[in-house]
Image (tube, rainbow, N blue to C red):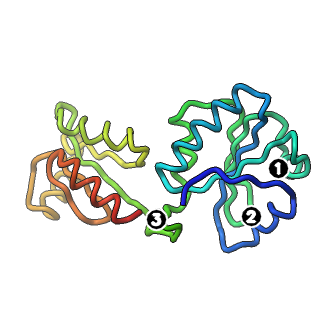
Amino acid sequence: MGAIKELRSVDEYKTLLSDDRHFAVLAFLSENSAKSIQAAQILSRLSNESHTPIWKINVQQTRDIHPLLAVNQVPTVVTIKNGQLIKKVVGLQNEGTYRKLLADAPHQRADGTEAPPLRITVYTTRTCPHCTTVKNHLKRKGVPYREVDVSSNASAAADLQRRTGQTGVPQTDINGTFVLGADIAKINRLIANTQ
């Protein structure tokens, strides 16, 4: 389940890495830093939306973890995969940057169990207003997706027609299930079923 949890010691950090988790997001913050407070608010919201847990380290209280990852500025957010540092984002970032960072995290359902990876492709054209509606909706929800413009990719257009029997856009492929048009309710149901 998404939420910001606090790591209070290097022992807790080592336990986190030795647990069955292959991926972790750590936020190094300070309660006396306005930028840290802003970052924490953004990260908390994104964690809850994506059901991705984030571990907060208050560098004023817990002084033995940040040197292990060469963190010397707050806020800093890092991702760790299989015990190795993957990405480090230093300083206050916009919501989009943090969303991209969390996009690497395995998706979790609301009950905390790991969900299959969410793979979304939106087939569009440049002049399609309904395509823009779908893309904006996914962005607002913080759901990563891949866009394929079928007006400039003839082989993708042919493949799409072969797979769905349809040529209209938008078509949204969510883990192999297609949604034709800007059916936001159906898109939300399919996403929710994987979370």
- Earlier-in-chain disc, 1 versus 3: 1
- 10 Å crowding of disc 1: few (<14), some (14-19), many (20+): few
Q: Residue 69: where, in percent of width, then height?
A: 82, 49
| Secondary structure state at the residue bearing disc 3 | loop
| Secondary structure state at the residue bearing disc 1 | helix
User: Residue 117 or 12: which is nearer the viewer?
Assistant: 12
- 10 Å crowding of disc 3: few (<14), some (14-19), many (20+): some
Query: In the rendered structure, which amino acid carries the disc numbered 3?
Result: Arg
Image quadrant occupied by the N terminus: bottom right
Disc assigned to residue 109: 3
User: In the image, which is nearer the foreground, mark 2 or mark 3?
Assistant: 3
Q: At x 64% / y 52%, what residue is drawn?
A: 54
Residue under label 1, please give it: 69
| Secondary structure state at the residue bearing disc 2 | loop
Q: At x 74% / y 60%, what residue is drawn?
A: 84
Q: At x 10% / y 47%, what residue is drawn?
A: 168
| Outermost bottom residue | 20
- 10 Å crowding of disc 2: few (<14), some (14-19), many (20+): some
User: Residue 149 or 29: which is nearer the viewer?
Assistant: 29
Please state if 95 lies on the left or on the right of 84 as rendered.
Answer: left
Q: Decide: is 114 above or below 192.
A: below
Q: Decide: is 26 above or below 159.
A: above
